[in-house]
Image (cartoon, rainbow, N blue to C red):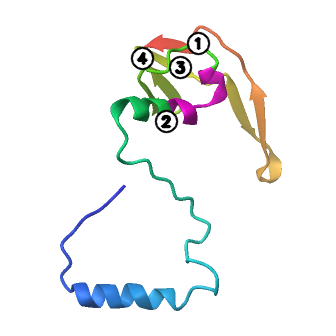
Amino acid sequence: MTNAKWARRPVGYIAKYAAKAADWPPGTSGTGGARWFGAGGLSHALRLLARWAAAPQWLQLMGWERDTPLRRQGSRWHVGAWLLRSPWGVRDLTGGVLEFFWRGWNADSMELA
């Protein structure tokens, strides 16, 4: 997400932002382990291909055409006219340990959107 606003005091803002870099540990950029990703400037066809490449493997292997529109909608995937639930589930075990399990498919796994 982005939040663009007019700067009231741009010189002061930039000076304060630059001063924060002095507090970062040597050899780091101060990102704190953040993950950075960008894919701007792609054509419509390349955006669809990039979404398919980033989709989970279970969804890629279902046989959909790569030019089928795909997007994430909450915990489900909206593929073409369908809304799909992942066949995988997660259990929260004691001590913050997560267990992934195969729950498979049932009548509620796929519905028309």
Residue 56: name its quadrant.
top right
In the rendered view, would you say 86 is above or below 12? Answer: above
Structural distance between the alpha carbons of marks 2 and 3: 19 Å
> Dot 1 surroundings within 10 Å: few (below 14), some, or many (20 or more)?
few
Label 3 belongs to which residue?
84
Q: Position of residue 99 (x, y in %)?
A: 79, 38
Q: Measured from the top left, where is residue 110 in percent x and y?
A: 53, 13
Q: Residue at x 18, y 73 (%)?
A: 6
Mark 4 crowd level (few <14, some 14–19, many ≥20, 10 Å Cα): some
- Separation of residues labelled 1 and 2 (CA atoms): 17 Å
The numbered mark at residue 80 is: 4
Seen at 41% across and 35% down, the residue is 47
Amino acid at dot 3: Leu
Q: Nearer the viewer, mark 2 or mark 3?
A: 2
Extent of the magenta region: 50-60
- The image quadrant that residue 13 belongs to is bottom left
Q: Tag 4: residue type?
A: Gly
- Whichever of labels 4 and 1 marks the residue nearer the N terminus, that label is 1
Check residue 50 in the rendering and tell me which mark sits there, or answer none. Answer: 2
Residue marked by disc 1: 63
Viewer-side label of 4, 3: 4
Pick whichever of labels 2 and 3 is earlier in the sequence: 2
